[in-house]
Amino acid sequence: MNLRGVRLRLAIVYGVITAITVGALAWYAASVASDRIYQSAERDAVSKVAEAAIDPESAPDNIWQVNITDEWATALGEEWVEPPLFTIVANAGGFENFQRFEQDGTWLAFTRPLDAGSTFVVSAVYLEDYESDVSGIRWRIGLAALGSMIAAALAGWYVAGRSLIPARQAAQQQRDFIADAAHELRTPLAVIQASASHTLSRDREVDAYRESLLEIRQATERASAGVGELLELARLESGQAKPRTAPLRLDLLIEEVASGVRVDDTKVEARPTISVVADADYGLLRQIIESLVRNAAARSDSVVLTATSHAGMAIIDVIDDGPGFDAELLPHVFDRFRRGDSKGSSGLGMAIAKTVVEAHGGKISAQNRDEGGALVRVELRVSAQ
């Protein structure tokens, strides 16, 4: 799946919807603002007529008294323009009326009747300043709308990217699983192929066939165990397998693990301790503690388990007297397929342990002890019950 293409399409759809919405709002805002500016021009024209009615001797500029019956017109104030007065009055139809006319620019004329319909007062307002205001506010609204669209497009790109994070993580997990499966199966399949080819190259004794089949069985068991661990790790990381927690006595758990693990030439024991209770999934926690113990027992003569609590955390320590972790391996001990020697299994045990502990809301760490050997520590929150 091309997530970049999906992100681009989502961002485009978001941008188009935003552009339509912002464009409509900008058009409406510009229309309302323009109407209000032109309404102020109309108020100015009416105001001129009102001022002339109050004091004809001090009438404003560009105002006339017109008699359409006798066909005469008189300027009441200073004239800046010569409008077609009789045409304007005739078009008014005997009522108050606003009209535009062109003469070295655009003008707004207002007509008001004074008597039975023969005499009128006409005022004129030059619209250049008003139109300049309209143009300016349209530019400002347009630029604001454009800026909003650009910001919305960038926000759409960001939001689309954020919304695709789960899909990107799922795709990455899928790629990781395929790569890990190929890594884990490569060696067993090579052993099976080599053993089968060697055995079939010529006739052999029965014991030779038996030895070859045993080698093939061991390789298939290793492949099966590795795939099983990979599937479990994938389920944990994807959230399909979530811990079903309940109060669990960790002191009893380590005693159970210590008594259940049997490794030749290695002593495994749980040190007596006080009662330590944490909220944990019994099955998952037992599995990883047993895995940690077997991993330590494969490299040491003695493994000790302890369960304590400190600062609200329940702590399980797995301590061994082996050679400890290689200095170069230690920072990567919980990475997949990181093995310091050939004594471990698939190299997934520590990675699974880390995933399980973190799914419980805890943490796991590994270190070399000053007195020799290694220490792996699991920390979980103490149960509130």
Image (cartoon, helix red, strand yellow):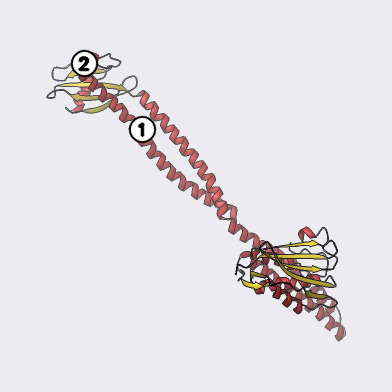
Amino acid type assigned to the residue bearing label 1 in the image: Ser
> Which residue is at 72% across, 68% downward?
308
Q: Nearer the viewer, residue 320 or 185?
A: 320
How many other residues sit within 10 Å of disc 1, few (<14), some (14-19) or many (≥20)?
A: some
Q: Secondary structure at mark 1?
A: helix
Q: Which residue is mark 2?
A: 56
Q: Is residue 155 above or below residue 271?
A: above
Q: Nearer the viewer, residue 335 or 122?
A: 335
Q: Secondary structure at mark 2?
A: helix
- Residue farthest toward the right in the current orientation of the protein: 205
Assign the N terminus to one quadrant of the image.
bottom right
- Look at discs 1 and 2 and give the one toward the viewer: 2
Amino acid type assigned to the residue bearing label 2 in the image: Pro
> Which residue is at 33% across, 33% downward?
35
In this rendering, would 382 be left or right of 94? right
> Which residue is at 39% across, 28% downward?
133
Q: On residue 34, which mark appears?
A: 1
Q: Is residue 88 above or below residue 336?
A: above
